[in-house]
């Protein structure tokens, strides 16, 4: 069994690129109670005439790419389940995310926009928060925690007098435990494989939701908890799969479905078993889009072989 790094953000990835700033909105919808919030819209340049001939990452930016063109924002809308899920993630421009629409299928619809955004400034750890753990989070996770810490401070200022208190009491242990448990539970079912990575996304979302609602004096409503956990899961997926956007989209989808399944369960059922039982029905996917058999992938299709001049191991770069 592969050892689990102590730094949770580096859970799966073997390499890391600087994470770009993300301005994204996500929501899980189930009979309307979780309708998406208004989307934050930075200046965007819509894609036009993008080719689907080669959907794998390219290794270099086009020479005409403006230097300020920072990344690709992908919106994924999943249907065909008891609930609809919409997520947004942003990836660097040169890893193929701009052609996510090539994977569209009856079950999932992807749209991609190139976006102009600034590199985020580092967010220092709030007073009282473990600086090492905080630095291991992605900027999007950090911003989400600060947002929800502010809400907890507003709801219960005596219990959470400052942001660090809310983060320490509510989030740190829950997130650490959920990431570790998700990885271990996925290994129980699939050993060490790409299926493990994707399956663990669902277990992480489910486990994190259960961890929060089982805390004493939990302050958020069910809808708020769903929104918060899906945002944290999506932020983690985006950070873990910077250079593998299609895998990140599959991980994020599984995570959101895991959250929704935990919310609908009500019995504290084992997340691994619930998620494993959902695979045959297609609610989650464990098919790696970068090493999948024909007619599969994040939206039902497989990336084509690397074009001439691209190394065979481009998926691992």
Image (cartoon, helix red, strand yellow):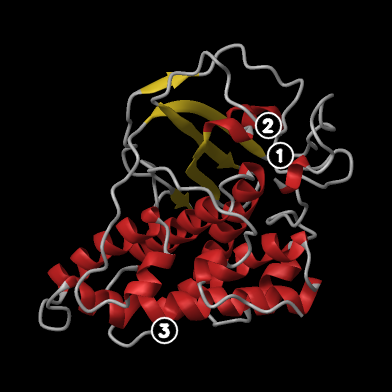
Question: Which residue does the numbered mark 1 point to in the structure image?
Answer: 299
Would residue 272 be found to the left or right of residue 190 on screen? left
Label 3 to label 1: alpha-carbon separation: 34 Å
Q: Quadrant of the N terminus?
A: bottom right
Tell me: residue 267, above or below residue 124. below
Lower position in the chain sequence, tag 3 or tag 2? 2
In this figure, which residue is indicated by the disc labeled 3?
Answer: 214
Label disc, if present, on residue 104 of the rendered structure: 2
Q: Is residue 69 left or right of residue 127?
A: right
Q: Residue at x 39, y 44 (%)?
A: 25
Q: How many marks?
A: 3
How packed mark 3 is, by other alpha carbons closer than 10 Å (few <14, some 14-19, many 20 or more), is: few
In the rendered image, residue 73, in percent from the top left (x then y), is placed at: 48, 34
> At x 54% / y 82%, what residue is drawn?
268
**In which quadrant of the rendered view does residue 138 lie?**
bottom left
Look at 50% across and 18% down and name the residue there: 65
Extreme residue toward the right, this view? 294
* Picture quadrant of residue 149: bottom left
Q: Looking at the rendering, in which quadrant would you find the C terminus?
A: top right
Answer whether residue 218 is visible to the viewer in this image.
no
* Mark 2 or mark 1: whose residue is earlier in sequence: 2
Q: What's the CA distance linking mark 3 and mark 2?
A: 37 Å
Q: Quadrant of residue 133?
A: bottom left
Question: Does dot 1 land on a helix, a strand or a loop?
Answer: loop
Question: In the rendering, at what x and y percent does residue 256 appear?
Answer: 54, 57
User: In terms of depth relative to the viewer, which is nearer, 113 or 109?
Assistant: 113
Query: Which residue does the image show at 31% across and 68% down from the upper left?
Result: 221
């Amino acid at each position: 069994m592969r050892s689990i790094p102590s730094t949770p953000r580096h859970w799966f990835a073997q390499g890391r690129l600087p994470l770009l700033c993300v301005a994204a909105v996500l929501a899980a919808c189930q009979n309307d109670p979780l309708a998406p919030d208004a989307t934050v819209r930075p200046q965007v340049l819509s894609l036009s005439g993008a080719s689907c001939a080669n959907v794998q990452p390219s290794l270099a930016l086009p020479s005409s790419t403006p230097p300020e063109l920072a990344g690709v924002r992908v919106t994924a809308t999943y249907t065909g389940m008891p609930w609809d899920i919409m997520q947004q993630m942003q990836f660097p421009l040169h890893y193929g995310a701009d052609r996510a629409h090539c994977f569209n299928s009856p079950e999932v619809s992807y749209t991609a926009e190139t976006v102009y955004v600034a590199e985020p400034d580092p967010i220092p750890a709030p007073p009282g928060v473990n600086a090492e753990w905080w630095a291991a989070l992605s900027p999007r996770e950090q911003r989400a925690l600060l947002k929800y810490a502010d809400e907890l401070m507003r709801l219960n200022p005596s219990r959470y007098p400052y942001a660090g208190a809310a983060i320490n009491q509510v989030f740190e242990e829950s997130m650490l435990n959920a990431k570790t448990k998700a990885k271990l539970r996925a290994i129980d079912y699939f050993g060490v494989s790409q299926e493990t990575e994707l399956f663990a996304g669902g277990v992480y979302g489910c486990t994190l939701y259960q961890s929060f609602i089982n805390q004493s004096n939990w302050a958020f409503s069910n809808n708020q908890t769903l929104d918060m956990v899906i945002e944290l899961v999506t932020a983690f997926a985006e950070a873990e799969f910077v250079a593998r956007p299609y895998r990140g989209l599959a991980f994020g989808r599984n995570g959101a479905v895991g959250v929704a399944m935990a919310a609908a369960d009500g019995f504290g059922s084992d997340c691994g078993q619930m998620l494993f039982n959902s695979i045959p029905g297609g609610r989650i996917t464990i098919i790696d889009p970068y090493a999948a058999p024909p007619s599969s992938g994040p939206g039902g299709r497989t990336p084509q072989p690397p074009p001439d001049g691209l190394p065979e191991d481009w998926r691992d770069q």
